[in-house]
Image (tube, rainbow, N blue to C red):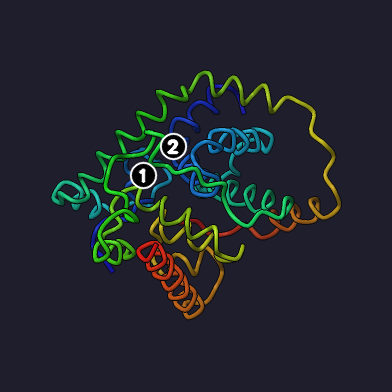
Amino acid sequence: MNEAELAKLYARYGYTVFRRCAAYLGVDDAPAAVQDVFVHAVRAGGPPAGSDPRTWLCRVADGLHSERASAVGDIGPGAPDPEASGLLPAGTAALAAPAAEQAQALGREVADDDREALLIVQRLLQRLPAALRRLAVLYYLDELTEEELARELRWSRRTVRRRVQGLLEQARTLLREREAS
Amino acid sequence: MSDHLPRHVLERVHANDPMARVNPVAHVHLTECDRCAVRKRALEVAHARYFAAHPVDAFAREVLARAAEPQPALGGLARLRRGLRRLWPRSRH
């Protein structure tokens, strides 16, 4: 992969990879993680022929985070707040909103910008087992449908439905706790 | 299920992704839906802000320099996982 090809790939998908890494690690550590993803891409000779580069890069990011997490016994992201960075779109932070809006913001239909999604995912990731972290990222960040989740994660639709319900329950608990404190 | 465009589709539209299986209906929806248009604009702003902070040329040079550094040898488990991944490529979304 030469410099021009890499530049093209990064220009097209760099922000997507950044957002994903920010969900796992927080925005401060995300740029270094983005580099790791693209270093991996260069060493692999670029995305495999016929593959979808965006999906491939996202899987590399997921895989690198998963390896890192298991290597250091990590239970979640360092999670500096994305609100502070100024790199993410402006909007009302879901977790700082009034209770009714918070509850609504958990539905994908109203989680309407990156910042809200990232905040939810970051806080959820801190308490989710490793197996569910990728589900949280795909559900909240990419907004995949049940069918797409089943295909990507190789789970049955029923398993996806059950685990998404569990995810929503965790998120509601998280919001209730924040509200109470 | 919402009729609005999910984020990964908005990103693909914004990136003019050649691999995107974006339904033409999605493009029509984007021209007619204020909510999706606002989300797409927010994405464009964030995108521009990110690349202002992390320019493409500098990034590409740094990545190529890092990729050229010698890699530590893979352990047995890592080699097995890499082999398995090549054997079972997954679907895309």
Q: Residue at x 25, y 46 (%)?
A: B39
Left or right: residue A112 compared with residue B12: left
Residue A128 occupies quadrant: bottom right
**What chain does mark 1 sit on?**
B
Q: Is residue A53 visible?
A: no
Locate residue A45, reporting x and y percent: 65, 35
- Label 2 is placed on what type of residue? Tyr
Badge 1 marks a residue whose secondary structure is helix
Specify few, some or many for label 1: CA neighbours under 10 Å numbering under 14, 14-19, or 20 or more: many
Quadrant location of the N terminus of chain B in the rendered image: bottom left
Q: Label 2 near label 1: C-beta < 8 Å?
A: yes
The disc at residue A15 is 2
Q: Is residue A180 visible?
A: yes
In the picture as drawn, the residue positioned furthest to the front comes out as A181
Left or right: residue A109 compared with residue A75: left
Badge 2 marks a residue whose secondary structure is helix
The disc at residue B11 is 1
Q: Residue at x 32, y 47 (%)?
A: B10
Q: Residue at x 38, y 41 (%)?
A: A83
Locate residue A35, reporting x and y percent: 59, 32
Locate residue B27, reporting x and y percent: 23, 48
Between residues A162 and B4, which one lies in front from this camera angle? Answer: A162
Residue A94 occupies quadrant: bottom left
- Label 1 is placed on what type of residue? Glu
Residue A181 occupies quadrant: bottom left
**What chain does mark 2 sit on?**
A
